[in-house]
Amino acid sequence: MSRYDALQGALPLLVLTILARRGPLHGYGLTTQIEAMSEQVLRVEQGSLYPALHRMEEAGWIKARWKVTAHGRRARIYELTAAGRKQLEAEETRWQAVTGAIGHILKHA
């Protein structure tokens, strides 16, 4: 099966979920988690990820800080905020409604 770019609408849900369950991560860590957890079906390009992270940071769902890694590199680390936890609940509810509706159409069309 070929790899697909993650749907733009699902990216905030994926990022918020991973940060809630895995803790603070840098952008590359988020990308590798999405790819690994989707068994390489989903691929997130940098051109999609970083603008999404910026929008989520502006919305107050995540916060970012610079950190020096064990390899001496600076990395921007993203962390979920209280507003992000609340938004995650809303995103999960929305996702369940959308996938339920799509499933209903597939079953009854």
Image: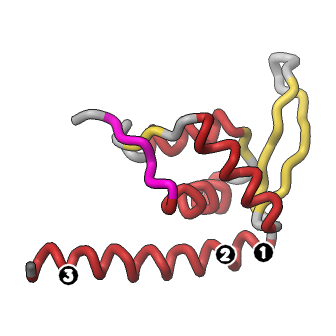
Q: Given the image, on which type of amino acid does mark 2 rest?
A: Gln
Which residue is the site of mark 2? Answer: 87
Labels 2 & 1 near each other (Cβ < 8 A): yes
Q: Secondary structure at mark 2?
A: helix
First in residue order: circle 3 vs circle 1: 1
Q: Position of residue 8 (x, y in %)?
A: 51, 55
The label on residue 83 is: 1
Along the line of sight, the residue nearer the viewer: 52 or 13: 52
Q: Secondary structure at mark 3?
A: helix
Along the line of sight, the residue nearer the viewer: 15 or 102: 102
Q: Viewed as shown, does residue 29 lie left or right of 65?
A: left
- Alpha-carbon span between mark 2 and mark 3: 26 Å
The label on residue 106 is: none
Q: Quadrant of residue 2?
A: top left
Q: Given the image, on which type of amino acid does mark 1 rest?
A: Ala
Which residue is the site of mark 3? Answer: 104
Labels 2 & 3 near each other (Cβ < 8 A): no
Along the line of sight, the residue nearer the viewer: 36 or 52: 52
Count of number-bearing discs: 3
- Alpha-carbon span between mark 2 and mark 1: 6 Å
Snapshot colouring: secondary structure
Range covered by the magenta-colored residues: 3-8
